[in-house]
Image (spheres, rainbow, N blue to C red):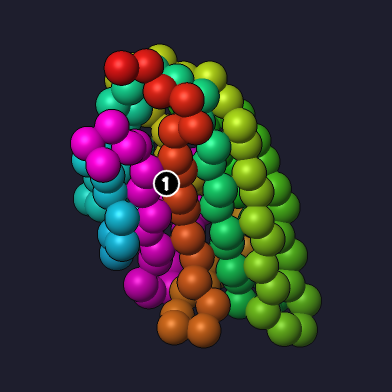
């Protein structure tokens, strides 16, 4: 398993009123093979160059809306929009991308948009971030 690069983490608490350009810090790490994910910053630093898959799921409270993007080295690589009117709602995004060693990947609220509400996570609806290398250099 030393060659495997993969991580899975989730948010343990609801984030109340995060603004634009807010990095989501997924504080509970389930898997971190390759030690690329940092639970204190929310960033995944690529340990090996290769082709990667990333997936992020975001839930929001009622009366909330957020554009949530996957950023690589501070540039958007993917984006989704989640809106909840009267009930909780969630959305999942995924990206397949070629990355170089030491690239930095994170999930954040879109910098140019003013979101409203809360990013929700509990034991029934988890806000998550995961990634894995499907073809890594040795």
Q: Is residue 83 above or below residue 44?
A: below
Question: Image quadrant for the N terminus?
Answer: top left
**Residue shown at 61% from the left, 32% from the top:** 96
Q: Is residue 130 above or below residue 47?
A: below
94 horizontally vs 24: left or right = right
Residue 130 in the image, given as x and y percentages of width and height? 45, 50
12 horizontally vs 63: left or right = left
Asked if the stretch drawn in magenta spans residue 135, the answer is: no
For the question of whether residue 114 can be seen, the reply is no
Residue 95 in the image, given as x and y percentages of width and height? 62, 36
**Residue shown at 66% from the left, 67% from the top:** 90
The residue carrying mark 1 is: 23
Q: Is residue 6 above or below residue 25?
A: above
Q: Quadrant of residue 5?
A: top left
Residue 52 in the image, given as x and y percentages of width and height? 50, 31
Residue 85 in the image, given as x and y percentages of width and height? 77, 76
Judge by depth and name the residue closer to the eye, 11 or 136.
136
> Which range is magenta?
1-24
Judge by depth and name the residue closer to the eye, 127 or 117.
127
Q: Secondary structure at mark 1?
A: loop
Asked if the stretch drawn in magenta spans residue 20, the answer is: yes
User: Chief secondary structure of the magenta span?
Assistant: loop
Question: Image quadrant for the C terminus?
Answer: top left
Name the residue at the front extreme.
Answer: 1
81 horizontally vs 73: left or right = right
Crowd band around label 1 with a 10 angstrom C-alpha radius: few (<14), some (14–19), many (20+): many
Name the residue at the right extreme.
Answer: 85
Q: Quadrant of residue 57?
A: bottom right
């Amino acid at each position: 398993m030393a060659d495997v690069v993969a991580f899975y983490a989730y948010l343990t608490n609801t984030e109340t009123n995060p603004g634009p350009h807010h990095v989501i810090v997924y504080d509970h790490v389930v898997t971190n093979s390759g030690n690329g994910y940092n639970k204190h910053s929310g960033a995944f630093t690529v340990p090996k160059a290769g082709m990667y898959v990333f997936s992020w799921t975001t839930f929001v409270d009622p009366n909330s809306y957020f554009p949530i993007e996957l950023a690589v080295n501070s540039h958007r690589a993917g984006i989704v929009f989640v809106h909840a009117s009267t009930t909780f709602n969630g959305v999942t995004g995924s990206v397949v991308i070629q990355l170089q060693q030491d690239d930095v990947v994170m999930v954040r609220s879109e910098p140019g948009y003013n979101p409203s509400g809360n990013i929700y996570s509990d034991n029934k609806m988890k806000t998550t971030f995961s990634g894995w290398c499907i073809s890594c250099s040795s």
